Image: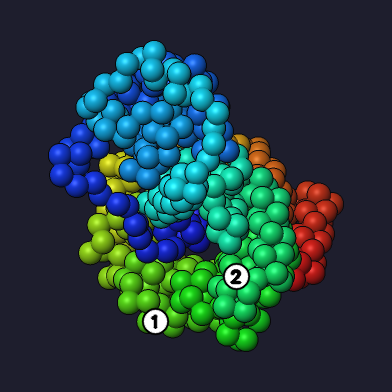
Amino acid sequence: MLDQEVPSYAADIRETTSKQVPTSKAKKAYQASPLIAERIRAARIAANKTQQELADHLYSKSYISAIERAKMTPSLQALGALAVRLGVPVSYFFGEDVPNQGALSTRAAAPDVVSESERAVRAEAALLDLSQAEALIRREKPREALEQLGDAPPEALPARYRPQWYVLVGWASTLVGKAADALPILEQGLRLAESLHSQAAPSEREQLAEQVERLRCFLGVAACGCGRMKLSIDYHRQCLAAIEERVIRDPELKLLVYKGLGNAYWRLGWHQEAIGFYQKAVEQTKNLDNERQRGLSYWGLGLVYREGGDLERAEECYREALRALGPLGDLWMLAQVRALLGQVLTKQGRYQEAEEQLHRGMETARELGIPRTLGVAWGSLASLYNARGEWDRAIQAGNEGLQHVGQGKDYEISGQLQITLALAYEAVNEYATAERMLQEAIYAFEQIQDYNRLGRAHERYGQLLERQRRFREAYDQMRRAREVVSVQREQP
């Protein structure tokens, strides 16, 4: 049966933005980002500045490049800071008051003396850009957020807000599949936040203390993304203690901690522990009044119930997730949950209902055109065909899924597809192909250190070898399965 992953953290938090909207006739011009892009580039060239020199310590070069290519429209505060640096009025960017190019070059070449007012403008611009980067992450655009955040915190960013830059970079890096890169960034942010907390005035310590725990929480998320479950649980457990000590008060952060622990324990196969924390997550959503959060928490709880064999409760959780997420119109999430519900119905032998859910999920997956989602959808159909003994259709569906995810490119989904295919190939007596599928699945799960699935893959391989009377090889695979289980139990 093809498994689904726990909902991504990009979908975990409600979308909030604090974008300032310009007024009067500047509003229409502000929305015309190609004009702004052209004017900023012209002013920079006239001022004999490179993109890096214009960015200096306030922004990143990639951010300036994105503005000049009209890929991103800067905030009014950012425009104000760039106008000061280029020696032009802000109105120039909106097509007004075109300055003399010679005067522009002379002004831009003057010594860069930063006044208090410019410092304030720079700080406000840096804070707004930080807020906009967070909004991009919440809208599931982590790559754009990383481009805006740059390679280092802007010098203009006030010290007490710098830890948040590390939170956002670590968060976005994890979402784009670079959890290993996120860990050292978040660790550096944690050290900074702890240092600021130790030196802060009493009135600021409470907020900084919670920021320390926020960094620990995202360290736990990144560690889980790297397959380092022990480290993930250690970080999240420290956050759990902070919740009990009322250091963490933010309801969203509490939710992330509970779900982080549920996810890590689920991946280790510790079902009771995972269920307990996901139940806490579901309970916590009552304090958020957010149907998206409620649906995602039921999604995770359903995964754990299904993994533990409680299909009735898993079905209840998935239907609760659909009720919560359906009105939101997020097709990706709906496709995922329908596939999960179809899998549970298949295991219950309710094939007609299962096929209905799976085809609805497949239609949505085709509409979205996301390879991973399509791979999961085809894998779910392959599992259904296996359950009905329709082996040829299962093989066709499973191979279709592999074509979408690309063998070896998405180890989690490709490994699960290969196990599904192995069952079908064995049923039609293609033992060599079934064996190859299981070998590739074992390799895939080794790459992501998924000990739970790895142990089961070794066990299934052993069973296949045993049925071929290759007892010594079968014994070796069963021994490896026990070793994996032993490693898994030692993880926490």
Q: Position of residue 76 (x, y in %)?
A: 33, 43
Q: Position of residue 209 (x, y in %)?
A: 62, 73
Could you tell me which secondary element the residue under label 1 belongs to?
A: helix
Does residue 297 show up? yes
The residue type indicated by label 1 comes to Asn
State the residue in front, 385 or 366: 366
Neighbourhood count class around disc 2 (C-alpha, 10 Å): few under 14, some 14–19, many 20 upward: many
Q: Position of residue 274 (x, y in %)?
A: 58, 75
Position of residue 32 in the picture relative to residue 13 (left or right): left
- Residue at 81% x, 49% y is 473
* Disc on the earlier residue, 2 or 1: 2
Neighbourhood count class around disc 1 (C-alpha, 10 Å): few under 14, some 14–19, many 20 upward: few
Disc 2 marks which residue? 208
What number is the disc on residue 95?
none
**In the image, which is nearer the foreground, mark 2 or mark 1?**
2
Could you give the CA–CA distance between mark 2 and mark 1, rounded to whole angstroms? 23 Å
**Going by the picture, which residue comes out furthest to the top?**
102
The residue type indicated by label 2 comes to Leu
Position of residue 6 in the picture relative to residue 231 (left or right): left
- Residue at 46% x, 44% y is 118
Position of residue 421 in the picture relative to residue 41 (left or right): right
State the residue in front, 42 or 438: 42
The quarter of the picture where residue 238 lies is: bottom right
401 in relation to 240, above or below: above
Could you tell me which secondary element the residue under label 2 belongs to?
A: helix
**Going by the picture, which residue comes out furthest to the left?**
25
Disc 1 marks which residue? 287
Does residue 431 show up? no
